[in-house]
Amino acid sequence: MKDRNVVFVIFIVIATTLFSGCFEEDQPNQNKKTETVSLKDLGLKTEDLPSGYMQYYTGFSYLSEFSNSSSESLVTWFINGSISNLTESGLITCELNKFNISSDAGQQFKKTIDYLISDRNFSIINGSINRIGDESKGLEKEGFTDILAFRISNIIVVISSPDYSITFNLAKIVEQRIKNSNN
């Protein structure tokens, strides 16, 4: 009789453990699908931009501080005119940085925003801009195009253009692509 009670108690403990979620996955499901999607597929495309823009550069050479410690990064430049005069070319940039886990991306996002504000003298365009992704910041500095940086889960996106309203609209497109990749 004691043996049956011990077996029954062990069975209850195992069943309770299985149904209580103790064996849940470490990473949230929202990171799984994004990991298999190429950053190139998530970023801006020429057809997303105002007319006249063409892709000028795609690669890894001109990454920002947001890319530090990322597992994968990609930056794309689009121009509308001559690259010899970036002010007149209307340069639009889109940088994507993928991290292994969301918390790493969150730490890098905060660290880089703090660095850009304190050491690089950027200022926040609108302190309440947290309208894109899990967190976002609009940054400005004289002589630079306005920047919108945001994070969704384990991906940090940095977009800039000559007009902040265009930057914001382009960020919404990338945000939607990332969200769609998680469904």
Image (cartoon, rainbow, N blue to C red):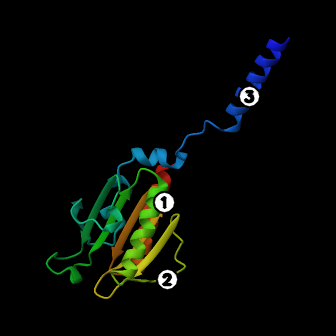
Q: Which mark is residue 126?
A: 2
Disc 2 on helix, strand or loop?
Answer: loop
Residue 139 locus on image (x, y percent): 40, 79
* Residue 159 shows up from this direction: yes
Question: Alpha-carbon neighbours of circle 2 within 10 Å: few (<14), some, or many (≥20)?
Answer: few
Residue 96's place in the image compared with 18, above or below, is below
Q: Check disc 1 and report the residue beneath it.
A: 152
> Could you say which quadrant of the image residue 99 lies in?
bottom left
Q: Check disc 3 and report the residue beneath it.
A: 13
> What amino acid is found at the position of numbered circle 2 in the picture?
Asn
Residue for point 45% across, 55% down: 154
> What amino acid is found at the position of numbered circle 1 in the picture?
Ile
Q: Earlier in the sequence, mark 1 or mark 2?
A: 2
What's the distance in space between the residues labelled 2 and 3, CA to CA? 53 Å
Disc 1 on helix, strand or loop?
Answer: strand
Count of marks overlaid on the render: 3
Most foreground residue, 30 or 172? 30
> Could you say which quadrant of the image residue 115 lies in?
bottom left
Q: Earlier in the sequence, mark 2 or mark 3?
A: 3
Which residue occupies the extreme bottom position in the image?
Answer: 142
Residue 63's place in the image compared with 18, above or below, is below
Residue 168 appears left or right of 119: right
Most foreground residue, 10 or 49? 10
Q: Which mark is residue 77?
A: none
